[in-house]
Image: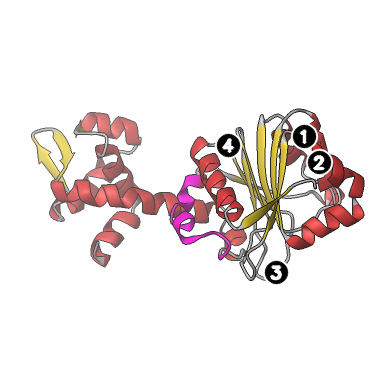
């Protein structure tokens, strides 16, 4: 797609929305005006520009995408979805380390969809986010990767397992050592629970997220900021495709991990 076409499409919401509407199929002008909720005088000059670039064809009162238009719009949608993810919280993403997300998943980051960024309030800076805990606790399974330690994690893991929730954990070596050294009883009980499994990340030198939690109802993602700190801001999404994306990220780290069993 040449820069001229990019400018034509991306620098006008009316042109962009018009093309995306025609992706559904041919439309007459009255239906287009009704669905886009724009005046005829504002839309028609934009449509003229699209026709001049052979992206749109008019046949009597019907408008449709040309063959070129169909190709362009098909390629345009993933770009727009990706831009939407970053534009929704520009400051958040600008200060995050994205290297822990493997290339095949960073290319599909648009699958996070209609996500939100949640962060602790001033009076709950050192608590686990209530919404985060609530959503995990109401799931039938929880798959979680952690490379930072929170003192409430051992209790959270145990409470989930005691509820009969399938719990699969991947911990960095440092987090695992904190668990078994400072929370011996909780670690022992967790390892002995039939519906829980525990892995240690074995691959050395790999850059990791702070947290990935994928459950059947929600995905949460925590990333270190550019200073290497985790400020307890989480991306949270309830969309099925986002949950699938989170599962794949969890599995990516599980493939680099070793399962721990009771001897």
Q: Quadrant of the N terminus?
A: bottom left
**How far apart in space, not on screen, are marks 2 and 3 (Cα)?**
29 Å
Mark 4 or mark 2, which has the lower sequence index?
2
Q: Earlier in the sequence, mark 3 or mark 4?
A: 3
Residue 234 screen position, x and y as percent = 67, 50
Rounded to the nearest whole Å, what is the CA distance between mark 4 and mark 1? 22 Å
Range of the magenta residues? 99-111
Provide the residue designation for mark 4.
238
For disc 3, the marked residue is 228
* Earlier residue among tags 4 and 1: 1
Q: Which residue is mark 1?
A: 161
Q: Residues within 10 Å of mark 4 (few under 14, many from 20)?
A: some
Instruction: Tell me if residue 45 can be seen.
Output: no
Measure how far apart labels 4 and 2 are at the Cα level.
27 Å
Q: Are marks 4 and 2 in contact (CB under 8 Å)?
A: no
Where is residue 3 shown, x and y percent of the image?
Answer: 27, 66
The reply to whether dot 1 and dot 2 touch (C-beta < 8 Å) is yes
């Amino acid at each position: 797609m040449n820069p001229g076409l990019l400018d034509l499409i991306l620098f006008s919401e009316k042109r962009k929305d018009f093309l995306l509407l025609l992706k559904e199929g041919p439309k007459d002008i009255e239906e287009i005006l009704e669905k886009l909720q724009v005046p005829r005088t504002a839309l028609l000059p934009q449509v003229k520009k699209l026709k001049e670039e052979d992206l749109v064809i008019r046949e009597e009162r019907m408008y449709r995408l040309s063959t070129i238009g169909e190709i362009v719009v098909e390629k345009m949608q993933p770009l727009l979805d990706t831009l939407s993810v970053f534009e929704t919280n520009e400051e958040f993403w600008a200060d995050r380390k994205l290297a822990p997300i493997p290339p095949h998943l960073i290319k599909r980051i648009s699958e996070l969809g209609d996500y939100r960024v949640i962060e602790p309030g001033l009076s709950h800076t050192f608590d686990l986010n209530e919404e985060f805990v609530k959503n995990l606790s109401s799931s039938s399974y929880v798959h979680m990767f952690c490379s930072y330690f929170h003192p409430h994690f051992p209790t959270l893991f145990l409470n989930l397992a005691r509820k009969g929730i399938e719990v699969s954990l991947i911990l960095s070596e440092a987090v695992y050592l904190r668990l078994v050294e400072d929370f011996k009883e909780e670690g022992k009980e967790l390892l002995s629970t039939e519906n829980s499994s525990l892995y240690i990340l074995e691959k050395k030198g790999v850059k990791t997220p702070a947290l990935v939690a994928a459950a059947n109802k929600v995905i949460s993602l925590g990333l270190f900021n550019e200073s290497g700190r985790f400020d307890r801001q989480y991306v949270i999404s309830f969309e099925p495709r986002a949950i699938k994306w989170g599962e794949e990220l969890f599995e990516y780290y599980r493939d680099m991990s070793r399962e721990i069993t009771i001897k």
